[in-house]
């Protein structure tokens, strides 16, 4: 097994031995069997799986608490791609030696999520892009095709959904990381941005950003985004769609299998297309704790989890988009996952979330202010002005 990342070891122990792998909750149960394969081949360097809660904000908080204290409890961390810059900028994760990793086999743009200030700090593991799920039976009855623009979606959500007693559109609009993603997509689709570069420049004060925010605010005000959507995270929005309560849903690819399974009221009655505008590039990267006691073992685990065999299981058992490009044209996988071409198109056209060494503060500010606007406590203009001020203070370190 080739060595991948090289972390800075604690001074008193061997760089090989048992390690822990920490992640947010594994919703499909694929991960333990995948790590069991490693453990069978490496009985002296076993990996113990630690699962944190489902919500991204809770996962982030627990990881940060451990890393900030200098703890070596977690060796390998499965982190949201948006956290890479923060963790690297804080010195919590070690740089990665990419020579032991299959970097040439990755989808375009994926590697960029693992870098900060020109240096590789993580190994791409799972990629992701938002997709638009739609009720193909209802659109067919209305005689329309899936929307190609956000304006078409808004029109269909406002006019078609009421005929059939369903909500028009929902994403993840509860004030947490998911709302930051949804706003980023709306702003990017309008041609704007929130931060530029590695997070040193605030760019949210623009007509495009106002247009993106107003799209969501108007949807709530006009009613084609139901009020209930303001309480939705990933799982709540998935459940609403599967219960037949929505015409359109913005969510991640994992919903495809669930919506088509037994018990879903929309099984056989939904389709999926790329988002009408720009999707945010999601997914997760694998990072090595800068204080890991066994960094060589951790390095080899990164290479194992990026191998073709492991990446195939990520998709086949975990319903998660792999980072290896070749799997998207694999005939057997295409037969089982016919949406792979759409997913690849979405991933390759997606844009990353703002990079920042203070990403946690950026995301909290974006979600809080956007939630205020969606709930009618402030206008979109006031929200953009507040965000511009708050983000400038965060970037300046105040």
Image (cartoon, grey):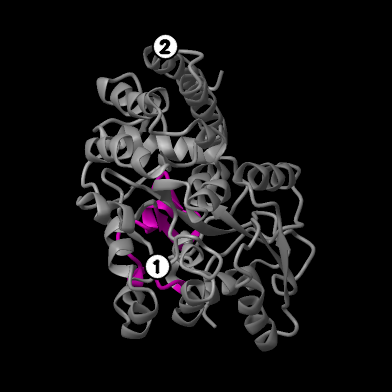
Residue 259's x, y, as percent?
48, 62
- Callout 1: helix, strand or loop? loop
Tell me if residue 51 is in the magenta stretch.
no
The image shows residue 298, relative to residue 143, as above or below, that is below
Q: Is residue 64 left or right of residue 357?
A: right
Q: Residues within 10 Å of mark 1 (few under 14, many from 20)?
A: few
Give the residue number, with chain letter if any, for mark 2. 382
294 and 218: which is toward the camera? 218
The image shows residue 196, relative to residue 40, as above or below, that is above
Tags 2 and 1 touching, CB below 8 Å = no
Q: What number is the disc on residue 268?
A: 1
Highlighted range, magenta? 100-129
Q: What number is the disc on residue 74?
A: none
Residue 42's x, y, as percent?
68, 84
Q: Residues within 10 Å of mark 2 (few under 14, many from 20)?
A: some
The image shows residue 371, relative to residue 309, as above or below, that is above
Tell me if residue 122 is in the magenta stretch.
yes
The image shows residue 2, relative to residue 151, as above or below, that is below
Q: Residue at (32%, 21%) from the top-left corner? A: 210
Residue 51's x, y, as percent?
71, 60
């Amino acid at each position: 097994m080739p060595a991948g990342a090289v972390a800075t070891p604690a001074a008193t122990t061997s760089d090989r031995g048992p390690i822990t792998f920490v992640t947010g909750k594994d919703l499909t149960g694929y991960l333990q069997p995948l790590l069991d394969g490693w453990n069978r081949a490496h009985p002296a360097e076993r990996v113990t799986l630690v699962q944190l809660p489902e919500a991204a904000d809770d996962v982030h908080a627990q990881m940060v608490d451990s890393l900030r204290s200098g703890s070596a409890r977690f060796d390998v961390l499965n982190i949201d791609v948006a956290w890479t810059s923060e963790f690297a900028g804080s010195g919590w994760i070690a740089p990665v030696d990419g020579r032991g990793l299959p970097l040439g086999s990755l989808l375009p743009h994926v590697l960029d999520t693992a870098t900060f200030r020109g240096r590789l700090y993580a190994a791409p593991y799972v990629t992701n892009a938002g997709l638009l799920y739609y009720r193909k039976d209802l659109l067919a009855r209305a005689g329309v095709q899936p929307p190609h623009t956000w304006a078409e979606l808004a029109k269909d959500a406002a006019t078609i959904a009421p005929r059939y007693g369903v909500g028009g559109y929902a994403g993840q609009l509860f004030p947490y990381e998911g709302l930051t993603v949804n706003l980023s997509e709306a702003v990017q689709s309008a041609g704007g941005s929130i931060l530029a570069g590695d997070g040193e420049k605030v760019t949210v004060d623009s007509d495009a950003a106002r247009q993106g925010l107003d799209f969501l605010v108007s949807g709530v005000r006009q009613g084609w985004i139901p009020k209930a959507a303001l309480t939705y995270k990933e799982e709540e929005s998935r459940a609403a769609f599967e219960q037949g309560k929505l015409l359109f849903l913005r969510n991640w690819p994992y919903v495809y299998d669930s919506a088509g399974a037994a018990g879903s009221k929309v099984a056989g009655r939904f389709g999926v297309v790329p988002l009408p505008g720009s999707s945010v590039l999601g997914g997760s990267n694998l990072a090595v704790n800068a204080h890991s006691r066994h960094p060589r073992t951790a390095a080899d685990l990164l290479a194992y989890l990026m191998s073709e065999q492991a990446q195939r299981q990520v998709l086949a058992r975990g319903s998660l988009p792999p980072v290896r490009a070749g799997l998207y044209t694999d005939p057997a996988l295409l037969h089982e996952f016919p949406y792979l071409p759409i997913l690849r198109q979405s991933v390759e056209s997606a844009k990353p979330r703002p990079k920042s060494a203070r990403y946690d503060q950026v995301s909290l500010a974006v979600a809080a202010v956007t939630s205020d606007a969606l709930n009618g406590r402030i206008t979109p203009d006031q929200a953009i002005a507040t965000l511009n001020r708050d983000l400038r203070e965060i970037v300046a370190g105040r």
